[in-house]
Image (spheres, grey):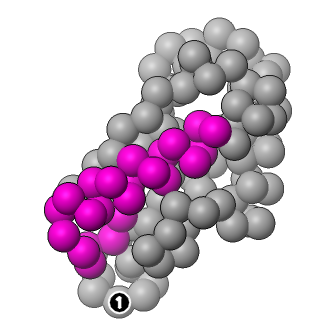
Amino acid sequence: SLKTVYFDFNSSQLTGEAKSVLSGNAEFMKANTSVKVQVEGHCDERGGVQYNLALGENRAKAVREYLSAMGVDGGRITTISYCKERPVAFGHDEEAWGQNRRGNFVVTSK
């Protein structure tokens, strides 16, 4: 029940839609206090490796910081950047790129 959030091109700023999704994720985490997660920051295929590695990390950190601000213990959230290495869409257009610019959740402890 933890939902993925999506980012605009070249940005780690949370959109209004992303904040709405994260509010729901925060409520889930506050209701399930034993759950720990890893937030994975992802990028589309454009940009160099070092740039995308940093962008993915900034995206994951933005998600963690927002959840913390919503009352979730930051110690329950780790972050990692997968850069452009784990795409979910393999096209070379805006539709595919938009799906790959994301922050998704992996439950690491229940």
The percent coordinates of residue 47 (x first, y second) are 24, 75
Q: Residue at x 76, y 35 (%)?
A: 69
**38 relative to 34 in the view: left or right:** left
- Label the magenta part by its dominant secondary structure: helix
**13 relative to 46 in the view: left or right:** right
**97 relative to 62 in the view: left or right:** left
* Vertical order, 49 against 36 (above or below): below
The percent coordinates of residue 11 (x first, y second) are 50, 69
**Range of magenta residues:** 43-65
Q: Dividing the image into 4 quarters, which one contains the C terminus? A: top right
- Tell me which amino acid carries mark 1: Asp
Asked if the stretch drawn in magenta spans residue 53, the answer is yes
The percent coordinates of residue 76 (x first, y second) are 58, 18
Asked if the stretch drawn in magenta spans residue 35, the answer is no
Q: Residue at x 65, y 61 (%)?
A: 14
Quadrant in which residue 65 is drawn: top right
Q: Dividing the image into 4 quarters, which one contains the N terminus? A: top right
Quadrant in which residue 31 is drawn: top right
* Vertical order, 85 against 67 (above or below): below
Of residues 10 and 95, the one drawn nearer to the viewer in this rendering: 10
Q: Is residue 48 visible?
A: yes
View extreme (bottom): residue: 93
Q: Residue at x 35, y 89 (%)?
A: 93
* Vertical order, 69 against 82 (above or below): above
Disc 1 crowd rating (10 Å Cα; few below 14, some 14-19, many 20+) is few
* Mark 1, residue position: 93
Q: Is residue 84 visible?
A: no
